[in-house]
Image (cartoon, helix red, strand yellow):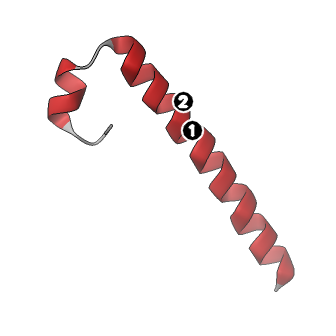
């Protein structure tokens, strides 16, 4: 959603902030998974 210009221009700031928080959470989770995979090699 954050890459959708139409969404970004029309969505309330609270919704945009919520989506940014979700993105940060998922990126952190992905980094943890990648670190675990790297340690298994």
Res 6 → quadrant:
top left
The extreme right residue here reads 39
Q: How far from the left and from the top, in percent, is residue 13?
A: 35, 13
Up/down of 31 relative to 17, above or below: below
Q: How far from the left and from the top, in percent, is residue 15?
A: 39, 20
The extreme left residue here reads 6
**Which residue lies at the image location 80% right of the left edge and 68% below the top edge?**
36
**Which residue lies at the image location 47% right of the left edge and 31% below the top edge?**
20
**Which residue lies at the image location 70% right of the left edge and 67% below the top edge?**
34
Element at label 2: helix
Up/down of 3 relative to 32, above or below: above
Horizontal relation, residue 11 to residue 28: left or right: left
Up/down of 20 relative to 36, above or below: above
Up/down of 23 relative to 35, above or below: above
Horizontal relation, residue 36 to residue 10: left or right: right
Q: How far from the left and from the top, in percent, is residue 5?
A: 18, 35
Q: Which residue is mark 1?
A: 24
Residue neighbourhood size for the residue with mark 1, other residues' Cα within 10 Å, grouped as few (<14), some (14–19), many (≥20)? few
Element at label 1: helix
Quadrant in which the N terminus appears: top left
Q: Nearer the viewer, residue 19 or 39?
A: 19
Q: Alpha carbon of mark 2 to alpha carbon of mark 1: how far?
A: 5 Å
How many numbered discs? Answer: 2
Q: Which mark is residue 5?
A: none
Horizontal relation, residue 18 to residue 41: left or right: left
Residue neighbourhood size for the residue with mark 2, other residues' Cα within 10 Å, grouped as few (<14), some (14–19), many (≥20)? few
Q: Which residue is mark 2?
A: 21
Res 16 → quadrant:
top left
Q: How far from the left and from the top, in percent, is residue 7?
A: 21, 30
Check if mark 2's residue and mark 1's residue have beta carbons within 8 Å.
yes
Quadrant in which the C terminus appears: bottom right
């Amino acid at each position: 959603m954050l890459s959708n210009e139409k969404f970004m221009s029309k969505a309330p700031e609270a919704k945009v902030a919520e989506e940014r928080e979700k993105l940060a959470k998922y990126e952190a989770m992905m980094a943890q998974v990648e670190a675990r995979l790297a340690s298994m090699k």
